[in-house]
Image (cartoon, rainbow, N blue to C red):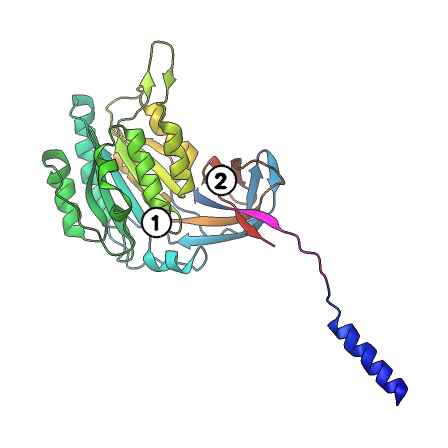
Amino acid sequence: MATVLVALGLSAQQQETPRFTDRVEVARIVLDARVLDDRGDPVPGLEAEDFNVKIDGKTVRVETATWIGGRAANLDRPPATVATLPGDAASTTNQGRLIVFLFQKDLEPSRIVGLMRMLLKSGRLLDTLTSNDRVAILSFDSRLRIWSDFTNDRERFDRILAHGILFERPAATSVSSEPSLVERLAPDSVHHAYSIERALELIGDALKPLPGSKSLVLVGHGFGRFSSSAMTMEDGYGAARRALVGSRTSVFSLDVTDADYHSLEAGLRLVSEQTGGFYARTHIFPDLAMRQLSGAIAGYYVLFVERPDSPRTSHEIEVDLTRRKGHVLTAETTSGVEGGR
């Protein structure tokens, strides 16, 4: 009996002894990648093994690659449905795509004709959106102006694009139900946004709390400062870039200038390259640019990758494909980190 009691006592003591296990925290980074083929159509069906990712020059392992969105719609007819796959977040799949149009208005002859053309073409693109997608419309001339919060009200879009932006001043914009862009844009800040760089910064900051990747279609003529020796960006550009990258917003720049080249296109090119979008001229083949835009905003991949052991808070990103052909659009830098085990 004593032997049994001792054994039982030892067993109880062993059960009460706390056990310690090693726990390793590994930082991970979420990357958004849009993949287009030579025709400008999205390339769905890719897996983690199809992506090669380098962070700060070092190859890192891609843990998962999840496609969010659908196939590009034909611009000549609206899609019946756009299939959305699970992944990024449940709220992302439920709300559809979030797209901001920002029209840079200028009455200079080499710009106004192109702007009018793209206002019409943008209306055709809106035909391809689904009931779950939400679009906000803003413009910039001497300052930032808000025409519409996120909505799918097509009649309102048509009025704004056909007449409002060119000939009117926007009325006070009511806040839509979630998701809302306007409620995150302080009126005083908007009123004093006298540069396109400041406007981009405000838009990026306002989009940051909203889930998933967002698209900003910048229809304009460019920005930056041109001197006799070089093209430089204004001081506010760095803050704009950080806000856009931090909010997972890709900028697609559609240049309305009637020229094969002009100095201010450098700003459009730079912001698109650094945020995972693209730059396109529209004075010769506007339909081609719109087709590419349709493909790019149709969907994207969410890549979950390990971050290299580095004290840096901002990282340089390179993404390409290993087993498939396609052009990958992704932000050149990122500061988005998620903790994991």
Q: Residue at x 36, y 22 (%)?
A: 233
Residue located beneath label 2 in the image: 335
Q: Position of residue 293 (x, y in %)?
A: 33, 41
Residue located beneath label 1 in the image: 72
Depth check: give the residue in front, 27 or 17: 17
Q: Amino acid at mark 1?
A: Ala
Q: Residues within 10 Å of mark 2 (few under 14, many from 20)?
A: some
Quadrant for the C terminus, please.
bottom right
Q: Amino acid at mark 2?
A: Ser
Report if residue 19 is visible in the image: yes
Magenta part of the protein: which range?
A: 20-29
Q: Residue at x 30, y 25 (%)?
A: 223
99 magenta-colored:
no
Q: Residue at x 18, y 26 (%)?
A: 106
Cα distance between the residues tagged 1 and 2: 29 Å
21 magenta-colored:
yes
Quadrant for the N terminus, please.
bottom right
